[in-house]
Amino acid sequence: MKKTTKRFVRRMVKRQLNEGGFLRVHRMLLGMVPQVDEVAILTAWNPNSEQLPRDENNQRNKELFRDLKTAGYGPIKIKGKFGNFERSFLVPNMSKSNVVELGQQYGQDAVIWGSKTESEENDVKMIFQYLENGQVQDARDVVLVGAHEHGEGEVEDVQAKKDYYSEKAGRKFVIPFFDENWEFELDADSVDEVLLKESVPKTLLAKELLQKIEERKKKLAVPNASKKYYWHHRCIMRENVRRLKKLVDSYNSLV
């Protein structure tokens, strides 16, 4: 067989393997793999929001991989970019408590966990949670992989994204946490309008949300952290602002 033919065959085999790897991951995230009822996504890169050299991050991920295998899991290697490039793992059938515990062990600000649900019409899908210290900061029920409407009259192609995406075998995917276009019920609005203290009702929930917003503002003032750290806290602050706006609107409608 000629060298050119061999190279062509190798490229075709590699392409088919890559496509199969992505399809496997995509089907899991859609809840279409019968044997997989839960999924988790986590990494060991950049612990405690400190940007480490790549060789140190790779070594940390090797240790995480060994821990996952020792615990009986079958981690799938993925990668992505959230301000900074990082390598991570998608772990089928990992419990919420286990991924939270392991994420904290490896110094991560947050982890992702998804659980399969079934509607009365027998429609199956995954509900994903963005977890910080075990607390749900946001949730989504969709995974984006191609072109889709984003905002009024805008079209976004996930495969063209330069940041804030995950990737398997050269194909990108996004769980759109903190994106108002994919919220279950919350509406986006002006941050400045919500943060006018005199407009906020004097209720316990409102005070708690204001306190959480102030705490995030302080975290965002920390210098020299990783880009993912700032994205993480900025998104959670914005989510708390939206919740506060909803509370303010509800209170004002009763006054």
Image: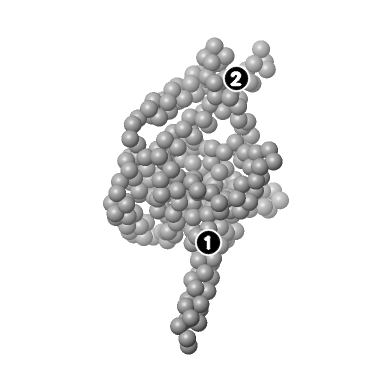
Q: Is residue 108 left or right of residue 135?
A: left
Q: Which residue does the numbered mark 1 point to in the structure image?
A: 22
Residue 201 image position (x, y, % from top left):
56, 15
Identify the residue shown where x is 57% and y is 19%. Answer: 193
Identify the residue shown where x is 62% and y is 39%. Answer: 181
SS at mark 2 in the image = helix
Residue 237 image position (x, y, % from top left):
48, 29
Identify the residue shown where x is 38% and y is 45%. Answer: 103
Amino acid of disc 1: Phe
Give the image quarter of residue 189.
Answer: top right
Query: Is residue 35 or residue 193 the one in the foreground?
Result: 193
Q: Which residue does the numbered mark 2 point to in the structure image?
A: 248
Disc nearer the start of the sequence (1/2): 1
Instruction: Report the Cα–Cα distance between label 1 and label 2.
Output: 43 Å
Q: Is residue 26 left or right of residue 154?
A: left
SS at mark 1 in the image = helix
Numbered badge on residue 117: none
Q: Nearer the viewer, mark 1 or mark 2?
A: 1
Identify the residue shown where x is 67% and y is 15%. Answer: 254
